[in-house]
């Protein structure tokens, strides 16, 4: 695994100020009116690389409770701090002060098997959640069989399309190394009660999130409404979802993040420019509620992102917009600019994928090869971008705007 030997000088320094971000490393998909927390994220392990060793760590968690768990060691800083990858896919950190004991076990790291994972989720979420598996996903749901099954179709369909869209000799994808877990609450209220513990006030503005730290998607039954009967078949699920197409786009958006961070398109805990990860998710988030799964195609313009971008380009876009998008995540973190920035991340990614695909793939690989906990400066981000797409940003910007004018006609 690429993370194995990455050593950072001071774990404290690297982690301070980032831990909070990690714990809310999620991004809300279609935030239509509110600010969203930042996201950041996982990466490729060449199939031929040997398995990671397994350790047993004993450490004090954030609540000062002692925990012992088996995990791989993703990062060990020079001061002894560690980032651990648990067998259910969570990334956990321990500072040198928190870490009480570390013991290398005589076996390789393996993800939890189905039965162990089911039991662990059942313990964590309780008896009214049911755990089911599809080929790639583990769905821990409070929403009933039918809705979980429908989500399973959607996730698998997205997985297949995303895999087919990107996997190539130049950009070889791999199978997920840890479980892809979706937690589905029975309704909005149950979701919000849970999400607010992680997102704080941001929970009220979102319909689902993917956490880079836990590697889980957290969603709710979008067909459930107070006083309404549950959907009785797939067609009924779709009929109910048509009332809120934005919400289903959120599910697709978050699931795209989860897949992308687990098959080698991005690396969890590394420096991922948000325009790249959000551009990827928005590229895929176009729902199609005429199809059985609510989602069918890839590569069509995303109508509401396009509308927003056209409006932005016409009235508010500054001359250095591309440069600030590429070099910093700040515009995503400001409530005033977040929607325009999502729209621009979508538009710019769409433009690059459609017209500079080879370079886009090269850039994806370059960023995915970054080591965890090494944060790039704005200059370094810009440099990395220019090393692939060339120095002349002004010219690329003109080409970009011209392309967007054409497709918005
Ligand atoms: Zn996102």
Image: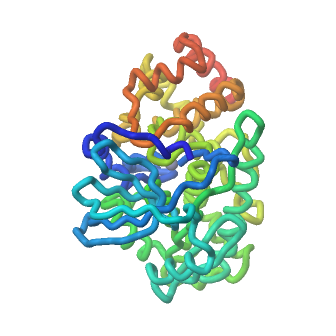
Q: Quadrant of the C terminus?
A: top right
For this rendering, which residue is in front, 294 or 376? 376
The location of residue 8, given as percent across then percent down, is: 36, 39
Left or right relative to 286: residue 167? right
The location of residue 74, given as percent across then percent down, is: 46, 51
> Is residue 145 placed above or below 301 in the rendered structure?
below
The location of residue 106, given as percent across then percent down, is: 52, 65
Left or right relative to 323: residue 233? right
> Is residue 293 placed above or below 380 in the rendered structure?
below
Residue that extends furthest to the front in the rendered view of this protein: 106
Residue 249 visible from this viewpoint: no
Residue at the location (49% across, 44% down)? 3
> Is residue 191 placed above or below 43 in the rendered structure?
below
Residue at the location (49% across, 57% down)? 210
Left or right relative to 337: residue 322? right
Residue 138 visible from this viewpoint: yes
Residue at the location (63% across, 71% down)? 240
For this rendering, which residue is in front, 105 or 84? 105
The color scheme shown is rainbow
Residue at the location (57% across, 61% down)? 108
The location of residue 6, given as percent across then percent down, is: 44, 40
Q: How many marks?
A: 0
């Amino acid at each position: 695994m690429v993370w194995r030997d990455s050593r950072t000088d001071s774990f404290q320094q690297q982690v301070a100020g980032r831990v909070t971000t990690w714990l809310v490393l999620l991004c809300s998909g279609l935030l239509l009116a509110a600010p969203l927390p930042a996201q950041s994220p996982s990466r490729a392990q060449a199939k031929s690389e040997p398995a990671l060793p397994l350790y047993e760590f004993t450490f004090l968690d954030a609540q000062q409770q002692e925990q012992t768990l088996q995990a791989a060691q993703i990062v060990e800083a020079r001061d002894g701090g560690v980032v651990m990858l648990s067998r259910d896919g969570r990334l956990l950190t321990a500072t040198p002060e928190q870490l009480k004991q570390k013991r290398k076990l005589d076996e390789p790291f393996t993800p939890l098997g189905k039965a162990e994972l089911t039991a662990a989720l059942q313990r964590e979420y309780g008896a009214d959640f049911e755990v089911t598996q599809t080929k790639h996903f583990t769905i821990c749901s409070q929403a009933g069989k039918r809705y979980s099954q429908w989500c399973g179709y959607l996730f698998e369909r997205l997985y297949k399309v995303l895999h087919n869209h990107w996997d190539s000799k130049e950009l070889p994808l791999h199978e997920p190394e840890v479980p892809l877990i979706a937690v589905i609450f029975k309704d909005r209220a149950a979701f919000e009660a849970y999400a607010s513990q992680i997102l704080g006030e941001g929970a009220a503005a979102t319909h689902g999130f993917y956490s880079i730290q836990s590697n889980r998607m957290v969603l709710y039954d979008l067909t459930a409404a107070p006083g309404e009967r549950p959907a009785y078949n797939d067609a009924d699920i779709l009929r109910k979802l048509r009332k809120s197409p934005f919400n289903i786009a959120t599910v697709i958006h978050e699931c795209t993040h989860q897949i992308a961070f687990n098959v080698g398109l991005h690396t969890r805990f590394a420096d991922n420019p948000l325009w790249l990860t959000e551009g990827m998710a928005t590229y895929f988030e176009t729902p199609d509620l005429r199809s059985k799964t609510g989602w069918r195609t890839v590569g069509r313009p995303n109508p509401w992102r396009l509308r927003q971008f056209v409006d932005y380009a016409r009235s508010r876009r500054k001359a250095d917009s591309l440069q600030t998008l590429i070099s910093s995540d700040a515009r995503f973190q400001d409530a005033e600019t977040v929607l325009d920035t999502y729209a621009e991340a979508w538009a710019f990614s769409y433009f690059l994928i459609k017209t500079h695909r080879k370079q886009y793939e090269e850039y994806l690989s370059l960023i995915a090869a970054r080591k965890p906990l090494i944060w790039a400066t704005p200059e370094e981000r810009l440099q990395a971008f220019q090393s692939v797409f060339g120095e002349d940003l002004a010219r690329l910007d003109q080409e970009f705007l011209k392309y967007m004018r054409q497709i918005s006609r």
